[in-house]
Amino acid sequence: MTFARIATVFACSYFAAFAGSSDLHKVPLALELKLNDLTVRGSRFVAELGIQVEKRPVSFRIGVRNINSTGQTIDLFKSGNNVEARWSDPNDKMGLITRSTLNAGEEQTVIIRLLPTAAEVNAPTVTLSSAGAIAASIAVSYRIDLAEKTRKTGGAYWSPLGLEGQILLGKAHYKLCTGAAPLGYHLNPDSIDIHAKSERDDHPRNCGLSYMECRPEPVEDGDVCYDLYIQGHWKAANLDHDDENDAIKVDVDLQATYVLDGSTFRLLAVDSNDSLRAPSRQSIR
């Protein structure tokens, strides 16, 4: 079984690099950043993208509002080979898509596009600057994992002896489950597969025969469960054969596939608690 390579990209390394910079103490403008109904103020932000699939592009939009009394020209810079940033509707006279002028009180939108990779050591970051000084920075945090995860379970199960199975004990009963869905994933119901085969071909037992039942239970939290009922073999003696009273071994395999949920992210102000509205999440496309 191959395990997913997990890579978490933290914003801390970027912010630490600027902790001693005097530029952060000379911010020429104040900005509000907005994601849907979440509006925050500050100079250092983190966009948390949760679980992402390696090399599957994602993009999101962040509103930027100039809350100064005068217009400001804001340039976008990026740090990291796997991130791009541009204004959605730039108004630069030279046609630059990374520069736009915001009038006092005006809001414009920044589009950030990311190609998640486990090779990144530092957080990919987008920096907003005016007149050469840093006004705000947005570090992007995410974790790499698989688009799908398949769980397999099962083993060897025995029926009771045939005489017991028919007269005393009925069928042997077992429960087989995959376990709850992995965090951040949901069950693909079309992927559920159960297979049973008895060790002896002369006494077949599988989910489609009358001597065995594989009864599904209602799925809760992505946990796929089956009740297994296995009957033994018994045949009374007669002129052609001796008495047969056998327990039957059956190998059962159950598997189900779980798909990564639609990714979400949160916008956090690291250096401010000034949240103007309730927090929210936006789906990544």
Image (cartoon, rainbow, N blue to C red):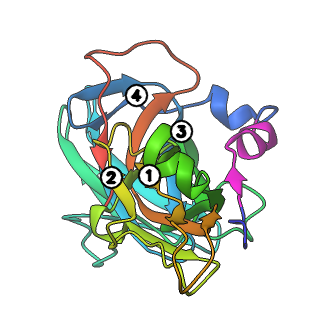
- In the image, which disc is placed on residue 4? none
Range covered by the magenta-colored residues: 6-18
Distance between mark 2 and mark 1 Cα atoms: 8 Å
Vertical placement of 107 versus 152: above or below? above
Is any part of residue 124 visible from this angle? no
Q: Is residue 89 left or right of residue 269?
A: left
Q: Amino acid at mark 2?
A: Arg
Label 4 sits on a secondary structure element that is loop
Q: Amino acid at mark 3?
A: Val
What residue would you read off at disc 3? Answer: 46
What residue would you read off at disc 4? Answer: 30
Of discs 2 and 4, which sits in the foreground?
2
Image coordinates for residue 238, horizontal then vertical, percent: 51, 76
Q: Amino acid at mark 4?
A: Ala
- In the image, which disc is placed on residue 229? 1
Label 1 sits on a secondary structure element that is strand
Q: Are marks 2 and 1 in contact (CB under 8 Å)?
A: yes
In this rendered view, identify the residue nearer to me: 140 or 196.
Answer: 196
Residue at figure coordinates x 71%, y 58% from the top left:
7
Residue at figure coordinates x 45%, y 52% from the top left:
228
Q: Earlier in the sequence, mark 3 or mark 4?
A: 4
Distance between mark 1 and mark 4 Cα atoms: 69 Å
